[in-house]
Image (spheres, rainbow, N blue to C red):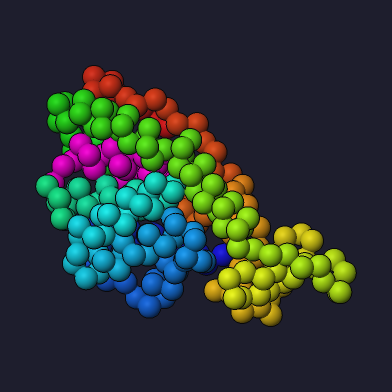
Amino acid sequence: MRTLALALAVLLSVAAAPVAAQGLTKAEQDALRPVSEYHFDQVFRENGFEAYKRGDFEWARRHFLSAARHADKASQLALSNLYANGEGVARDLALAYAWADLAAERGFPKFVARREQLWAQLTEAERERAIAEGTTLYAEYGDAVAKKRHQMQLDRVTFRSMGRRPSLRGAVDTYVYSGCSGSRNVAGNGIGGGSCFVPDYFDDENWKSSDYWRVQDSVWGGGSGEVEVAPLRRAADAVPKR
């Protein structure tokens, strides 16, 4: 799967300066390119960054929201950055914190660090509101619902569009999907020679939820994608270490 590592520095640079001021190199754009048009987390994230580069912050926000609904933590952090910088929206540090807290749900170290930077900037009143905003966001965009939404989308695509053909080569399946084709072995690894978007198009890591999120999370510094997340803190509480 295409890595997003090159995009990490771009995302986190917003703490000091807007993403547009940093720019995206061709390599960074390639890193953000989606596996397919049906991976909504990737497609809408890419569209969001493209809109941001044009200075169309409202369009970027809409696309980041769509990606966020499909469990994309990078887009959730991007939304936090928009609110922190007041780009296309009124500057709102409480809402910026709520989005950063959601982006840090899986415990990615740099995402957590960004969240804590924002918490330190909040007033007592803003901290109270951040907790309320976060509760609402988790109900719609938290992994408990967003990952299920993401997998349901991929399941519909594979059920409706992906045909499987047994191969004369034995332990290799040949796949046909929306005009492109490719092969993979019994271990679930693409073996090339196909005409799809990327050489590893039919790998399990692109379509099977557990494999997909394992690879995605490894880019941002995670592993299994499953971490314990402490409850939302009250304003009077000390900032805990998670």
Looking at the image, which is closer to me, 185 or 227?
Answer: 185
Instruction: Indicate yes or no whether the magenta region holds residue 11.
Output: no
Instruction: Indicate yes or no whether the magenta region holds residue 98.
Output: yes
> Residue 129, percent across and down?
20, 29
The answer to whether residue 35 is seen in the rendering is: yes
Q: Residue at x 45, y 42 (%)?
A: 146
- 119 relative to 230, above or below: below
Q: Residue at x 41, y 38 (%)?
A: 142
> Residue 228, percent across and down?
50, 31
Pick out the residue farthest to the left.
90
The answer to whether residue 73 is seen in the rendering is: no
Q: Main secondary structure of the magenta part?
A: helix
- 52 relative to 78, above or below: below
Quadrant position of residue 193: bottom right
The N terminus, quarter of image: bottom right
> Residue 67, percent across and down?
38, 53
Quadrant position of residue 226: top right
217 relative to 177 in the view: left or right: left
Q: Which residues are magenta?
A: 91-114
Pick out the residue farthest to the front.
160
The number of numbered discs placed on residues in the rendered structure image is 0
> Residue 69, percent across and down?
39, 46
Q: Residue at x 38, y 40 (%)?
A: 141
- 71 relative to 19, above or below: above
The C terminus, quarter of image: top left
98 relative to 17 in the view: left or right: right
Looking at the image, which is closer to me, 81 or 152?
Answer: 152
